[in-house]
């Protein structure tokens, strides 16, 4: 392994099955293109349109998640962005860590933070109630039944 | 061996010495390629940590309207409004430069035009920020 091989030595086919590093590379590009569309749309609706950031409150989010369109939009953004971000951070960990233990700890931290937030975010999107019982009428969406 | 290999000897001749500049086209360091790479990394790390916070704050909609409104209220202050400009600037650069990377990988002439593409990225970034920044300043500083 340590000896420098002669030029033109054929690459050894390790035949380990799936080439994860290659699919990670492909994933960064495929998810990147989709994320450009999803995040630009998200920023346009939440920050540019209407009153921008000042319009965002519980009723605003409730109104969005009352439609499957924004549930699917945000869920796709959640999964694609977190995996894209965690995999990008993995590249930096590989580049900048020198000790194997540090490398391992940081990668586990990345994996856990991404996995936990994906589960949390998905549960929030699909179990969210825009009209919680007992919530004040002025804090919830206008379509919520009064009382 | 070949005459091009003897650049050191040639460079020492008086006529060659005057013409000699910093090596061009051989060093990656300090050029568009390096700065796009540096900016891609820095913006990527910034966006990642914002994303972690943003998912947690949005998850508060599952707690109560009051809890979510209290936290999202802090996003509407002038200081955070300026922070959102920085965030959008980072996202827009990362997005356009990411598309540039894809073109370098898959477009036949991508590597040939990678420097031009970097200036296209900067141009599109300026146009997008011109569409966003005045609008955002209006939102955060008007009542």
Image (cartoon, grey):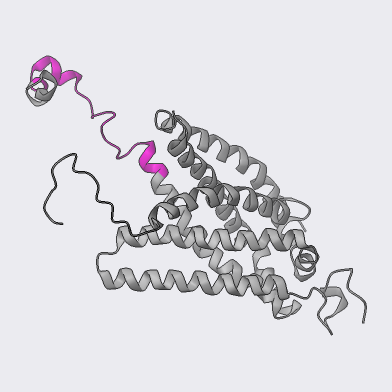
Q: Residue furthest top?
A: B15
Quarter of the picture containing the C terminus of chain A is: bottom right
Closer to us: A122 or B42: A122
Work out whether residue A79 can be spotted. Answer: yes
Please, is residue B45 above or below residue A137 in the view?
Answer: above
Please, is residue B102 above or below residue A140 in the view?
Answer: above
What residue is drawn where x is 11% and y is 24%? B5
Count all numbered tags in the image, as a single digit: 0
Work out whether residue B70 can be spotted. Answer: no
Residue B76 location, x and y as percent?
68, 63
Closer to us: B118 or A31: A31
The quadrant in which residue B80 appears is: bottom right
What residue is drawn where x is 44% and y is 32%? B110
Closer to us: B61 or A107: A107
What residue is drawn where x is 56% and y is 69%? B53
B75 left or right of A84 in image = right
Please, is residue B104 above or below residue B7 in the view?
Answer: below
A106 left or right of A80 in image = left
B2 left or right of B48 in image = left
A116 left or right of B78 in image = left
| Membership of A95 in magenta stretch | no
What residue is drawn where x is 63% and y is 53%? A39
Q: Residue furthest right?
A: A146
Q: What segment is highlighted magenta in the picture?
A: B10-36
Residue B28 location, x and y as percent?
30, 38
Residue A71 location, x and y as percent?
72, 63
Quarter of the picture containing the N terminus of chain A is: bottom left
Residue B111 location, x and y as percent?
40, 32
């Amino acid at each position: 392994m340590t000896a420098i091989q002669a030029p033109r030595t054929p690459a050894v086919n390790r035949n380990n099955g799936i080439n994860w590093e290659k699919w990670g590379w492909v994933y960064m590009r495929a998810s990147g293109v989709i994320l450009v569309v999803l995040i630009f749309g998200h920023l346009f609706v939440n920050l540019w349109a209407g009153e921008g950031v000042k319009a965002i409150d519980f009723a605003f989010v409730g109104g969005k998640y009352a439609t499957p369109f924004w549930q699917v939009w945000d869920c796709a953004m959640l999964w694609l962005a977190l995996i894209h971000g965690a995999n990008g951070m993995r590249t930096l960990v590989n580049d900048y860590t020198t000790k194997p233990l540090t490398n391992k700890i940081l990668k586990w931290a990345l994996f856990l933070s991404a996995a936990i937030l994906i589960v949390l975010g998905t549960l929030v999107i699909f179990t969210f109630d825009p009209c919680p019982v007992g919530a004040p009428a002025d804090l919830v969406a206008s379509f919520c039944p009064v009382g | 061996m070949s005459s091009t290999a003897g650049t050191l000897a040639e460079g020492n001749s008086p006529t060659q010495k005057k013409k000699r500049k910093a090596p061009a086209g051989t060093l990656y360091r300090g050029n568009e390629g390096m700065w796009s790479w540096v900016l891609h990394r820095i913006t990527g790390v910034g966006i990642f940590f914002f994303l972690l916070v943003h998912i947690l704050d949005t998850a508060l909609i599952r707690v109560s309207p009051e809890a979510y409104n209290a936290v999202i209220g802090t996003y509407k202050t002038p200081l955070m409004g300026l922070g959102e400009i920085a965030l959008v600037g980072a996202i827009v650069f990362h997005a356009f430069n990411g598309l540039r990377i894809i073109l370098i990988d898959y477009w036949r002439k991508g590597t040939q035009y990678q420097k031009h593409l970097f200036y296209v990225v900067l141009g599109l970034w300026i146009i997008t920020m011109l569409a966003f920044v005045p609008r955002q300043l209006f939102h955060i500083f008007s009542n």
